[in-house]
Image (cartoon, coloured by chain):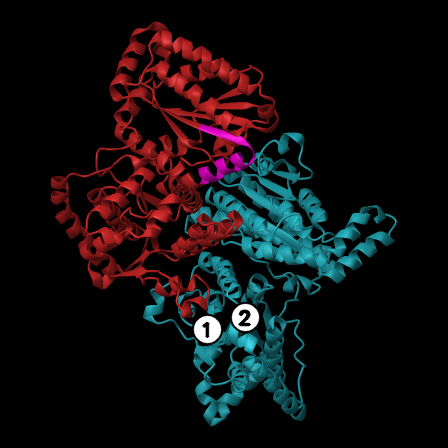
Chain colours: A red, B cyan
């Protein structure tokens, strides 16, 4: 969930200076169009970790936009008047009318998360709040409201650095109080429960947008561009009145950083080291797979996705070599059959959930919905947008039934892919592996990369995290996969 | 929620014999069209109280329809294979493909409700299940599935009678086992938690349909007609591809019985008795409204709806006469203003939530959405269909904040309305109360009556029940309202 927001996104000053005037002008135009059209209101929720620039962003929006059509609500301690009513009442009263923007700094998420972090409420109470929130936001969305939920994130390290930085400067020292450091100590708990809440409330109608808070210029451009696109998209949709997505757009490209580009593709093993490690890891996995506690209580789902020619097949074979042949099944996923098309898109995966003590290896997965179906336009945006939360629900069901879900994205660089394609063309027994489709997909490299980043952002969760494998070295990729699986099983035994 | 299903609905044998052949033929036709179109599947959930004819209905559908396109799943104790997977897995695997009908006899609702009734799970665990179910059904609905949820209901008395009846006949004696009587003892708990679950899961996409189970002929005709209409509606919508409601239709007219027609309009008071009672009740209410516990912890929302010339105004005046003028406000609801139209439809009511110790009296309410807006076509079916659950959510928020919600429907007979209209015309100072609109509404008497019945069925809940007032005698109506309010306040002090 937070992977993309811990990469150190940043924008250079000269780029920022160039882009901002244009963005501000467009935002003002969009705002006037919104007021003019007056067919829907916008709610912006601002949440996230301390020090990630929530307040600065709110101030910035206030500066950039026309304050006549925007209202900021800093929701602090409830007043006597508010305490006498339902907790949601203060928000009911503050909702913006059609044509206006309401910014909520502190929202209906604040209390449920904080009370869980400090242990004042139980997990099931948080679940109840989450249910209420989802129904409330669904209602707002059905009533036409465009809901944009920003979550500003900082890694633990970055938060510490930020607090220290503010303390050093006499001008900003006052902004750091002792409670900030208190809260910093609870960072891990806060991260855990916000991740959980974000996952359960990232619905098709109102998904969360996680923004890295380290660099102010990056943060500002991101927020501004998302807001601009969201307003204009909706205005256009209303004109077309099609059944397009009601959700705001995903995080746009702001800098060149993303989780795929940030991979270190030089990671590799020499053949002798690889052989040694392979033997060791396969032995370890074999033992774990026969562990009585695993056989009795758990099962394993391995989800393989990756670039064409990324080496998924060879990787999978190194896993199965460590397992008892009666224990696992490999499920290759191709285009859906007619029978499968007559069912919800998750149906064909439901058929292969492993029983206790068993391993199911999916060669391509349910993520096709948000990868190939998204990029190739096989399904409308509204459908793949809601798929993220549906997939999270699906994996949570598996997790609750003691089924460990391990998800691999096997990445390779564009150059390495070309090398492998050429090799496949040359070597007779590899030719069958290269099709025209592979070349076509390669032509859409950037779109696929964006889809992969969005997928990891929206579906990498503590219960089913993505492991991104640096795959230029097949040796390295195989060892990393084996090691990940071993460690995951060990963590529950 | 169960009001309409405790009226003793019944269909005469000769009516049944006449209607069934036609219905069966139409159902078969619809089923072929469904298979032919093959663009969506149908899921029928069958739940409800023991002895209400769940099994008989399932058997009937099997007999009436073409078994090649229908599959019944009696979900009993999970198998070993099923216990190794997520609890929902057995349902995942059993979903019907497009063009087919799947009947679930025992569904994903069974376990959560039963475990709560027998005290094996806490309320918050039920809430978690409800959240999961709502997301699951939303996903199925988004994927195109038509979900029809039947709840077969019997009053406690009717259940007892039914069990005794079965026991008497040697042919059916075997059907009653001791556990049936055990469960009968838990009727009240079962009713409470099923009402709660039905309320929270009657969403716009998949609302519950409560069917009275006493009379087999009524039950069968009702189920058959709803199913027929649901299939044909959806097939038509798909052709038109408009944004119509995805939900199945509401309970159709089968017999002449409904909660409005069942009222005893002869209930009345003579003037002397009325005066005595009025004084007594107003005194009681005045005391209660000044009770320190009420003033400190509770507030009161009175929601008045009723037929034109039903006497709402006079009724309200008898309430306020008992209250301190500083303690209450009357909120008359007319057509929404431009400002109100720029907000979700509940917004204008949010503004008037009373603070602690206070009373808010709404003269017409948020139920306009499912009454006038529905009947006059001011909003599309999909919008008023989802309003039932949104209103239930709203009232639950109030209830949780210790705001007592009392809802009155002041009913009068058609004849009495005419009499009052004529009187208004004659008496000078009453003329202003009669408008052309009143006559227009009167022309739609039956549609309004149906809308009122649906409203009560879908929004009369244990936390905010409807009180239907027999209003032909204004005296009787006033005393009943006062008494209801007094008893509600007393119940929490």
User: Which residue in the structure is indicated by mark 1?
Assistant: B354
Q: Is B128 part of what is drawn in magenta?
A: no
Left/right placement of residue B369 relative to residue A273 reads right
Give me the chain letter of mark 1.
B
Disc 2: host chain = B
Q: Which residues are magenta?
A: A390-406
Q: Going by the image, does B371 lie left or right of B181?
A: left
Classify mark 2: helix, strand or loop.
strand
Asked if badges 2 and 1 are on one and the same chain, I answer: yes
Q: Residues within 10 Å of mark 2 (few under 14, many from 20)?
A: many
Query: Which image quarter is the N terminus of chain A in?
Result: top left
What crowding class fits label 1: few (fewer than 14 Cα within 10 Å), some (14-19), or many (20 or more)? many
Q: How many marks?
A: 2
**Magenta residues, dominant SS class:** helix
Residue B132 in the image, given as x and y percentages of width and height = 53, 45
Q: Is residue A367 left or right of residue B46?
A: left
Residue at coordinates 36% horizontally, 68% vertically from top-left? B340
Q: Position of residue A423 (x, y in %)?
A: 29, 10
Q: CA distance from mark 2 to mark 1?
A: 10 Å
* Upstream in sequence: badge 2 or badge 1: 1
Q: Residue at x 36, y 31 (%)?
A: A371
Can you say whether B79 is above or below B293 in the image? above
User: Which numbered disc covers residue A308?
Assistant: none
Residue A427 image-quadrant placement:
top left
User: What residue is shown with label 2?
Assistant: B404
């Amino acid at each position: 969930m937070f992977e993309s927001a811990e990469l150190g996104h940043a924008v250079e000053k000269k780029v920022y200076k160039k882009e901002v005037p244009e963005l501000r002008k467009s935002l003002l135009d969009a705002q006037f169009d919104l007021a003019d059209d007056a067919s829907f209101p916008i709610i912006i929720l601002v949440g996230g970790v301390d020090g990630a620039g929530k307040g600065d962003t709110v101030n910035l929006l206030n500066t950039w936009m026309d304050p006549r059509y925007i209202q900021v609500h800093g929701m602090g301690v409830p007043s006597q008047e508010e305490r006498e009513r339902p907790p949601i009442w203060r928000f009911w009263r503050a909702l913006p009318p059609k044509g206006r923007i309401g910014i909520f700094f502190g929202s209906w998420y604040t209390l449920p998360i904080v009370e869980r972090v400090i242990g004042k409420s139980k997990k099931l109470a948080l679940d109840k709040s989450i249910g209420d929130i989802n129904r409330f936001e669904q209602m707002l969305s059905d009533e036409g409201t465009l809901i944009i939920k920003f979550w500003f994130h900082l890694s633990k390290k970055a938060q510490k650095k930020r607090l220290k930085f503010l303390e050093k400067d006499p001008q900003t020292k006052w902004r750091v109080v002792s409670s900030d450091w208190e809260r910093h100590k609870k960072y891990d708990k806060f991260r855990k429960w916000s991740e959980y809440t974000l996952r359960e409330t990232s619905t098709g109608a109102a998904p969360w947008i996680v923004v890295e808070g380290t660099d102010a210029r990056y943060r500002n451009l991101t927020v501004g561009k998302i807001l601009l696109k969201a307003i204009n998209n909706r205005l256009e949709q209303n004109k077309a009145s099609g059944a397009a997505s009601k959700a705001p757009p995903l995080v746009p490209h702001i800098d060149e950083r993303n989780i795929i580009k940030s991979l270190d593709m030089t990671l590799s093993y020499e053949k002798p080291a690889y052989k040694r490690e392979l033997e060791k890891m396969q032995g370890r996995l074999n033992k774990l797979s026969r562990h009585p506690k695993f056989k009795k209580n758990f099962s394993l789902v391995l989800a393989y996705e990756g670039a064409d020619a990324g080496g998924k097949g060879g990787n999978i074979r190194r896993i199965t070599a460590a397992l008892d042949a009666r224990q696992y099944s490999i499920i290759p996923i191709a285009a859906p059959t007619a029978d499968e098309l007559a069912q919800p898109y998750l149906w064909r995966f439901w058929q292969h959930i492993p029983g206790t003590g068993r391993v199911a290896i999916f060669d391509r997965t349910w993520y096709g919905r948000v990868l190939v179906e998204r990029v190739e336009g096989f399904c409308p945006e509204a459908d793949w947008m809601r798929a993220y939360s549906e997939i999270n629900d699906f994996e949570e069901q598996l997790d609750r039934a003691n089924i460990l879900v391990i998800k691999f994205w096997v990445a390779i660089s564009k150059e390495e892919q070309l090398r492998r394609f050429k090799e496949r063309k040359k070597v007779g027994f590899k030719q069958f592996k290269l099709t025209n489709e592979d070349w076509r997909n390669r032509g859409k490299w950037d779109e696929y990369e964006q889809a992969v980043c969005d997928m990891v952002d929206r579906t990498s969760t503590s219960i089913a995290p993505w492991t991104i494998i640096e795959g230029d070295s097949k040796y390295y990729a195989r060892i990393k996969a084996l090691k990940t699986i071993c460690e995951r099983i060990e963590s529950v035994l």
